[in-house]
Amino acid sequence: MLSILKILIMLQEKNSLSSTRYSRKDVRSFLVFFEAYLEDSLQNLDGPTVDLARHVVLSGGKRIRPLLCFHCGAQNPNVTNDLLKASTILELVHVATLVHDDMIDQALLRRNSKTIHSFAGDHTAVLLGDALFSYALELATDFPTNRICRIVSKATRLTCSGEIRQNSSRGDASLSLEDYYKFIQDKTGELFKASCQLGALLSGHSEKDIDLVGEFGISLGICYQIYDDLLDTFGRKDKTEKSLGSDFDSGKLTLPLILLLQDVDASNRDIISESINKSVCVDTKLVISKLFDSHFVIPKCLDEFNKHFSNIKLIANSVSDPVLSDNLTGFLSFFSSKITLLNTLKTSNFLALHE
């Protein structure tokens, strides 16, 4: 394991993070340093919390929030250490939400590993999530300005608020598209926004660009949540690394189901409404699956995704700093595989019926 001091020495010697446009090599280097920094940071936790935290924090993941922070701050190589710390804070908050989400949804797998609640119990899962939230905020106080802590604290609060609103709407077949977008903006978009703003703030960008990258993060978070909701509803287990169908089984109404409920007649609406948050038979699942197909829900969801993705591109092009603008556009290229995966959802695989 690398100590923080060794990481800083390596950063100074390697000086691999460009002061202009980043390269793929820069991204790989940053992720290597980030993983070492993250692992080292976990050693400051207490007692058995360390092993539990290592299980969830170091089990892989796409590291989207740290990468957003890097892409918005890579223009200034002098702040690399600050970017590593900020990225660690963001990832800890994110993982804390996953620990709680998995317990709420009773999901058994996350990144092909057992979820905390599934082997340590709900009580431990709650406390571990709380410990990770608290530790992230503790690290945020290390910066000389309290603005970092304010941004992280606000994002954490709104993330939790979004989750509370979504949980309170479980089984509510009258949930509107506007309601859905509001709570996914909070539960996912706000932490994406904070990730972008921390990178831009630490690297010394203008207030206007800090605001714009925040908008970029919000829109990206909405797109990402649509992507995640589509996979949960229609995906195949061999293409993902988590339990599928947990949204419907736990009563969460996401974009596919909301669009379907808006379009079906009263009798089919009753069938769907009575099935939400219940253990339903295969025949009922097949009926709902056919409704998804006959009402063209997947293409409608893809239209919603593409609308928001186009907005992300417009925001990236609006950023005044040309290097930052290019880096944001470059980040979107990492989403090409996700868009490709969405385009393979030709027919409904509702609740993974066709594994």
Image: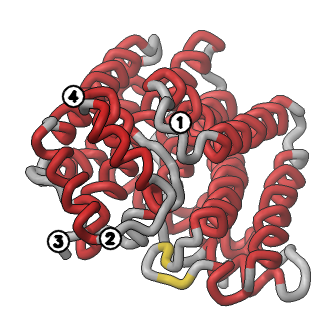
Q: Which of labels 2 and 1 is toward the front?
A: 2
Say whether disc 3 or disc 1 marks the residue closer to the N-terminus: 1
Q: Considering the numbered disc 1 on the image, is that residue within a helix, a strand or a loop?
A: helix
Considering only order in the chain, which callout, 3 or 4, is on the residue closer to the N terminus?
4
Q: Which mark is residue 281?
A: 2
Distance from the alpha carbon under mark 3 to that under mark 2: 15 Å
Whether residue 24 sits left or right of residue 16 in the image: it is left
Q: Amino acid at mark 3?
A: His
Please name the amino acid that badge 1 sits on: Ile
Q: Are marks 4 and 3 in contact (CB under 8 Å)?
A: no
Give the vertical position of 54 relative to 148 (above or below): below
Q: Nearer the viewer, residue 130 or 21?
A: 130
Q: Can residue 252 be seen from the camera position used here?
A: yes
- The residue pinned by badge 4 equals 303
Labelled pair 3, 1 in contact (Cβ < 8 Å)? no
Quadrant location of the N terminus in the rendered image = bottom right
Is residue 8 in view? no
Look at label 2 and name its amino acid: Cys
In the rendered image, residue 333, in percent from the top left (x then y), is placed at: 26, 42
Few, some or many residues within 10 Å of mark 2 (<14, 14–19, 20+): few
Judging by the rendered image, the residue that carries numbered circle 3 is 354
- Quarter occupied by residue 318: top left
Marks 2 and 1 sit apart, C-alpha to C-alpha, by 29 Å
Could you tell me which secondary element the residue under label 4 belongs to?
helix
Viewer-nearest of labels 4 and 2?
2
Residue at 48%, 62% in the rendered image: 278
- Local SS, label 3: loop
Circle on res. 184: 1
Residue 275 on image: x %, y %? 41, 55
